[in-house]
Amino acid sequence: MGATCSAGSFDRAEQKARLLRRHLALMTFTDPLPIRLYLAHPGSRLSTFVRGKSSASPYWAYLWAGGWALAHHIARNPQLVCGKRILDLGAGSGFVAIVAALCGARIVRAAEIDDYAIEAMKLNSAANSVHIEIAGGMLDATNVLDQIDLILAGDVFYDEKVARSMFTFLSDCSRHTIDILIGDPGRTSLPRERLCEIASYDVRDFGLPEGATVEAGVFRLK
């Protein structure tokens, strides 16, 4: 799931990393675990360098409710990941992947399509002294068979088109006996009829006022 880098691609990655260190702030959290992450702040001005250079808006610079719910669930139930091979699907900042690593996962892989998100994950994993194997580009079920024990999918049902693609991928993986945990605050595109809620948490979410929370669930495929 890895890739080799030319000198040119390495230089471009280092340039992105420098921009992220300049525009993001290294923030410290203690809930659900002590963790440090490079995230956006009111003075980040991300649009000054991301616009037109990234495949999407900088969602990776914020923490979302589904990821928070998965992080809480893993921290409270570390046996779910301890000693296992984990894939964080649509990993963004790498928050969930890092929590899994801190809770004893044997191998942690993170799938992400945005170049800036990939560089943010590298910074965040280094800030927490954990190792994450990052897979860029799209995956299909054959990419993870015999390599992954558990998929963690936070906030991947944010619009109808992406939701269809994600559900197809996760269903294919489930048929091959890969365990799957989904974190989501109940967005419109979440296929609730195909899921079983196993836990819920009052968590933060991007866009909420300081101190406000929203209820987000942790689900398994039926």
Image: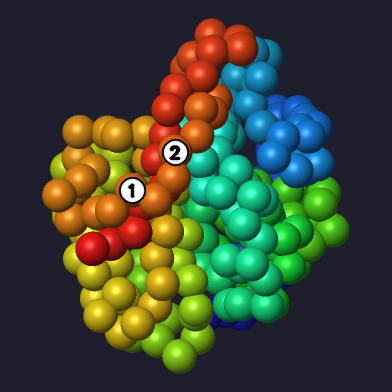
Residue 119: horizontal and vertical position, in percent? Answer: 64, 52
Between 127 and 116, the one nearer to me in the picture: 127
Residue 10: horizontal and vertical position, in percent? Answer: 69, 64
Contact? badges 1 and 2 (CB < 8 Å): yes
Task: Estimate the spatial distance between the alpha carbons at disc 1 and disc 2, rounded to whole Å.
Answer: 8 Å
Can the viewer see residue 69 in this picture? yes
The image's colouring method is rainbow
Res 200 label: 2
Taking the spot 60% from the left edge, 10% from the top edge, the residue there is 210
Report helix, strand or loop for mark 1.
Answer: strand
Between 14 and 107, the one nearer to me in the picture: 107
Between 65 and 118, the one nearer to me in the picture: 65
Quarter of the figure with residue 139: bottom left
Left or right of 200 in this view: 38: right
Report helix, strand or loop for mark 2.
Answer: strand
Within-10-Å neighbours for mark 1: few <14, some 14–19, many 20+: some
Taking the spot 31% from the left edge, 76% from the top edge, the residue there is 173
Left or right of 198 in this view: 195: left
Total marks drawn?
2
Residue 19: horizontal and vertical position, in percent? Answer: 70, 37
Res 197 label: 1
